[in-house]
Each structure stands twice: as structure tokens, then as C-alpha cells.
Amino acid sequence: MQTDKPLEGKAHNLPGWLRLLAILAGGLSGFGGFLVFGIVFCFVPVVLILGAIIQPYVPRLGRWVFSVGAMLVTVYVVLFLVPQAFGAITMLRHYHEPHDLAVLSLFVLSTALVIWLDAALVRNEKVKKTS
């Protein structure tokens, strides 16, 4: 007997657009951290990117790595990139060069993408629970 309902405990693949958003958010936040803080800050988003890449092939492990990576990138952005962005915004009126504007834009864009990713993950889980 075959039904359309998924088996309990079976991990499902995340939508492709959500994985692509995770790769983009992780890549931009890692690049922003690299520009300001150095190479060490590239390793935090790698967990999210790795989870997004392996999730279709190893669903259960990929979803776990994806979730841990999303949490780490959110904490990373809140603790490091958002304060730098606010500092750059306060100094913008007195001093700005093209490099500073580019880094500020990168911080704002990566913060927006991480917020969008977190909201999309919550929405995806709510939709999955109701169906």
C-alpha cells in the first residue's frame, strides 16, 4: 500500500532555492568576515555551505549540518558583522571611501540574507509540520 504521506523520522530534502540561499548567505558573510577580521572567519560559514551541498545526498546528516551551520552563521553575523556595520554607518557621515562603502554594503547584504535564510527555514519547517 502506497500513500502520499512521508514516513515518520524520514529526512526530506530542503528546496533547492533554500540551499542556494544558504550558500549565498554563507559565502557573503564569510567573505565579509575575511575582509575585516582575517581568514579565520571564513571557517564558520563553511559549515552552512557544506550542509547545503551534502543535504540532497545524505538527507539526515545534511539537514543536521545545515541546521548547525545556520545557527553558527546567525550567531557569527550578530556578534561580528552587525556591530561592524553599525560602526561603519555612524562613521559614514564623517569619513567614507569607496572601499568602506563596499564593505558596508557587503555587511548589510549578508545580514539581510542571513535574516531571510532564518525566516525561510522557520517557514519551511512550519509548512512541513502542517502537511
Image (cartoon, rainbow, N blue to C red):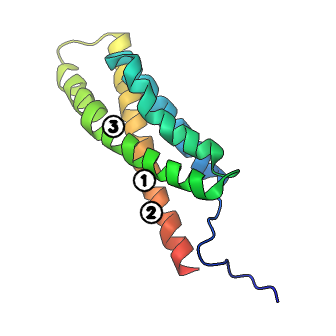
Q: Residues within 10 Å of mark 1 (few under 14, many from 20)?
A: some
State the residue in front, 87 or 92: 87
Q: Is residue 76 visible?
A: yes
Amino acid type of disc 1?
Answer: Asp
Q: Quadrant of the N terminus?
A: bottom right
Residue wearing tag 3: 77
Q: Is residue 57 left or right of residue 30?
A: right
Seen at 56% across and 72% down, the residue is 128
**Residue 123 to residue 107: above or below:** below
Seen at 17% across and 14% down, the residue is 94
SS under mark 1: helix
Residue 118 circle label: 1
Q: Residues within 10 Å of mark 3 (few under 14, many from 20)?
A: many
- Residue 10: name its quadrant: bottom right
Q: Quadrant of the C terminus?
A: bottom right
Q: Earlier in the sequence, mark 3 or mark 1?
A: 3
Q: Is residue 102 visible?
A: no
Residue found farthest to the bottom: 1
Q: Are marks 3 and 1 in contact (CB under 8 Å)?
A: no
Q: Is residue 48 left or right of residue 37?
A: right
Residue 122 circle label: 2
SS under mark 3: helix
Question: What whole-number distance in Å separates the C-alpha atoms at marks 2 and 1?
Answer: 6 Å
**x then y, percent, for residue 19:** 60, 48
**Residue 34 to residue 5: above or below:** above
Q: Earlier in the sequence, mark 3 or mark 2?
A: 3
**x then y, percent, for residue 2:** 81, 85
Residue 100 circle label: none
**x then y, percent, for residue 110:** 42, 35
Amino acid type of disc 2?
Answer: Val
SS under mark 2: helix
Q: Are marks 2 and 1 in contact (CB under 8 Å)?
A: yes
